[in-house]
Image (cartoon, rainbow, N blue to C red):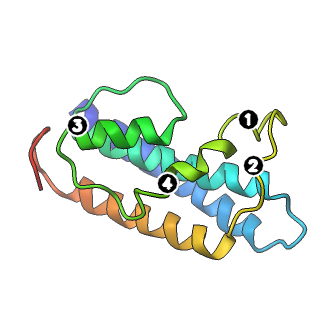
Amino acid sequence: MVEASVARLMLAAARRDEQAYRALATLPDMNDAVIGFHAHQCVEKALKAVLAHKGVVFRRTHDVAELLDLLSDAGVVSPPHADRLDELNPFAVEARYGLAEPGRIDREATTVMVGAVLAWTEDQLSNPATPGERQ
């Protein structure tokens, strides 16, 4: 199934961003915009992996809130920290290209959030639920 391979590729990409985030977050002098970018990318790709797994069509976007809405519309149980994940949005494009300074990132809280979203993603991808099915 195409969705399954896309989902696994997206999860692998999310894991690479998690690795970059975790490595950079240990560096006290590393700019928070760079660290936040990789946290955002990890979460974005994890959400897209679940959407692909569920067969939900999504457009190219960096908007975590939009991806969360698509998951909700599909009847997928929300990921951990869903109420805070969109706080990573400013790190996606604006900060990456120096168009905005999103502020400081709580590295400890973000580490917990990223880990929880990835664990949720793994769980979702191991569940053979059909698209739109409530879990």
CA gap, disc 1 and disc 4: 16 Å
32 horizontally vs 78: left or right = right
Residue type at the position of mark 2: Pro
| Viewport quadrant of the C terminus | bottom left
Q: Residues within 10 Å of mark 1 (few under 14, many from 20)?
A: some
Residue type at the position of mark 1: Glu
Q: Residues within 10 Å of mark 3 (few under 14, many from 20)?
A: few
Residue type at the position of mark 4: Leu
Of marks 2 and 3, which one's residue comes earlier in the chain?
3
Name which quarter of the figure residue 98 lies in: top right
Return the residue found at the far right: 29
Name the spot of residue 105 as percent of width and height, x first: 71, 63
Foreground: 128 or 34?
34
Q: Residues within 10 Å of mark 2 (few under 14, many from 20)?
A: some
Name which quarter of the figure residue 5 lies in: top left
- Per the image, the residue denoted by label 3 is 73
| Viewport quadrant of the N terminus | top left
Of marks 2 and 4, which one's residue comes earlier in the chain?
4
Of marks 3 and 4, which one's residue comes earlier in the chain?
3
- Per the image, the residue denoted by label 4 is 85
Of marks 2 and 1, which one's residue comes earlier in the chain?
1
CA gap, disc 2 and disc 4: 14 Å
Q: Residues within 10 Å of mark 4 (few under 14, many from 20)?
A: many
Mark number displayed over residue 102: 2
Q: Kindly identify the residue that appears in the image at 17 percent across and 44 percent down.
A: 75
**Helix, strand or loop status at disc 4:** helix
CA gap, disc 2 and disc 3: 29 Å
